[in-house]
Amino acid sequence: MPPLRIEARGLHKRFTRRWIVQDFSHVFEPGSRTAIVGPNGSGKSTLVKLLCGQLIPSEGSVGFYESGKLLPAESVYRYTSLTGPYVELIEELTGEELLQLHFGLRGFRQNLSRVLLWERVAWTKGIRNQMVASYSSGMKQRLRLLLALATESSAVLLDEPTSNLDAEGVAWYRALLSDWIGERTLIVASNEERDFTEGSECIAAEAWLPKAKAVLPKG
């Protein structure tokens, strides 16, 4: 898949009466590397979900273009992959069953196979056949990253990718990102410098934080 161009125009998002994202506009060029930075609670996760089509904006729009062609809204999910600490894994499955299910639904890029994926985490067959519910938080996060980066997609969006990872896990993530991101569009939301690729364009929270209409009037 060619990399994705993502165009956010006058983007707003509110929950109940409170605005989380306000008047955000930016063009993420195909193959670009972008760092979304801001403190906890600043709305990074909300913005990332808007930028991959998982949330519908309250105002404004997000357009997704592949090779210059606007993608239908209902097909955007097939061109993007998103992960974050909040992404739920099916814990009733074993690790092996989860990879099989994901492969059947989305497929893996560049002829990646389940064998190659397991080699990247170096887990024994016994661990792969354990229920995901038995995995530690760090193991679950590695599995999320593995699936997000292995998925056949045009854009990859990562929210706090090194959350729950120790120093070895952080090094593992950075190597995986370097090896597997390819020419795809990459957006990473975090307040940790280690999560970003070198040369990433930085977008700070001031670009989307509410200004004039932070709270809607009652009535």
Image: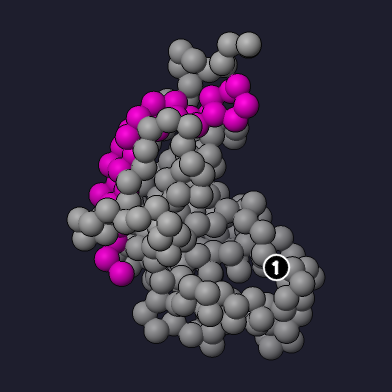
Picture quarter with the N terminus: bottom left
- Left/right of residue 18 with respect to residue 134 in the rendered view: left
Range shown magenta: 1-29
Q: Residues within 10 Å of mark 1 (few under 14, many from 20)?
A: few
User: Residue 196: x, y in percent?
Assistant: 42, 51
Residue 36, quarter of picture = top left
Instruction: Classify 203 as above or below 97.
Output: above
As drawn, the residue found furthest toward the left would be 68
Kindly identify the residue that appears in the image at 42 percent across and 45 percent down. 51
- Left/right of residue 151 with respect to residue 168 in the rendered view: left
* Residue 8 part of the magenta-drawn span: yes
- Left/right of residue 179 with respect to residue 126 in the rendered view: left
Picture quarter with the C terminus: top right
* Residue 25 part of the magenta-drawn span: yes
Kindly identify the residue that appears in the image at 67 percent across and 77 percent down. 95
User: Residue 203: x, y in percent?
Assistant: 37, 36
User: Residue 126: x, y in percent?
Assistant: 74, 86
Would you name the residue on which mark 1 appears?
90
User: Residue 148: x, y in percent?
Assistant: 50, 65
| Disc 1, SS | loop
Instruction: Classify 128 as above or below 68.
Output: below
The secondary structure making up most of the magenta span is strand
Closest to the observer, 167 or 101: 101
Kindly identify the residue that appears in the image at 46 percent across and 16 percent down. 211
Instruction: Classify 175 as above or below 39.
Output: below
Kindly identify the residue that appears in the image at 35 percent across and 55 percent down. 72
Q: How many discs appear?
A: 1
Examine the rendering and report whether any part of residue 122 can be seen: no
As drawn, the residue found furthest toward the right would be 134
